[in-house]
Amino acid sequence: MIKPIALLGLFAMAGCGAGPGSDGGGPGRIAPDADRLQIARGPEGLCYGRTTTPAVIETVTEQVLVQPAQLAPDGELLSPASFRTVTRQRILRERREQAFEALCPEALTPDFAASVQRALAVREAYDGPVTSRFDGPTRQALQAYQAAEGGPDSPVLARTTAVLLGLAALRRDEISALSED
């Protein structure tokens, strides 16, 4: 026979787990959806995101005269002019790829994702709930915020943006560079 006290303890412990919408994330776990972000590790151990700016192409369509109109000596139209349509494309700006330093995936824990969401919300760049995930609304808000601040137009969190948001510390070499200016 199971004692009522043991059942009460079992029910009490069931309430100690992660709540709905949470993955129980703590240190050491990568936030859900963070591993889907395109982050590559460089040879020096730093991580990089990449943005691609598409080419800007202009399409020009013009009518080219194939045969001029044929007129009689008295000015009467014998045959109308004939034209053909020519369509050309020209590149106004080439496609560009740009790499930028990003935070490595192991730093993108659920707690960190929640901090990013709160930091963006304080700056009125995110109005969704704190989900502790790098979900679609969070990535959209992050991309818009970074682009508006002159950073990469990417849903991948740039290290410079993390520093700007107060979520990552400057490295010693960066501090030294600031003190030299």
Image (spheres, rainbow, N blue to C red):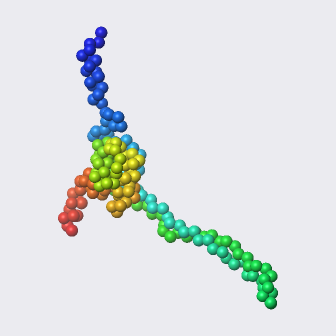
User: Residue at (44%, 59%) from the top-left corner?
Assistant: 52
Using residue 114 as the reference point, say whether residue 137 is left or right of it.
right
Outermost top residue: 1
Which quarter of the figure is the N terminus placed in?
top left
Q: Quadrant of residue 48?
A: bottom left
Q: Quadrant of residue 125?
A: bottom left
Number of marks: 0
Q: Nearer the viewer, residue 21 or 34?
A: 21
Asked if residue 75 shows in the view, the reply is yes
Horizontal and vertical percent position of residue 137:
39, 48
Outermost left residue: 179
Horizontal and vertical percent position of residue 105:
34, 46
Using residue 131 as the reference point, say whether residue 77 is left or right of it.
right
Q: Nearer the viewer, residue 107 or 151?
A: 151
Asked if residue 42 shows in the view, the reply is no
User: Residue at (78%, 88%) from the top-left corner?
Assistant: 75
User: Residue at (75%, 82%) from the top-left corner?
Assistant: 69
Which quarter of the figure is the C terminus placed in?
bottom left
Horizontal and vertical percent position of residue 19:
32, 34
- In this picture, is 65 found above or below 55? below
User: Residue at (37%, 53%) from the top-left corner?
Assistant: 141
Horizontal and vertical percent position of residue 133:
35, 43
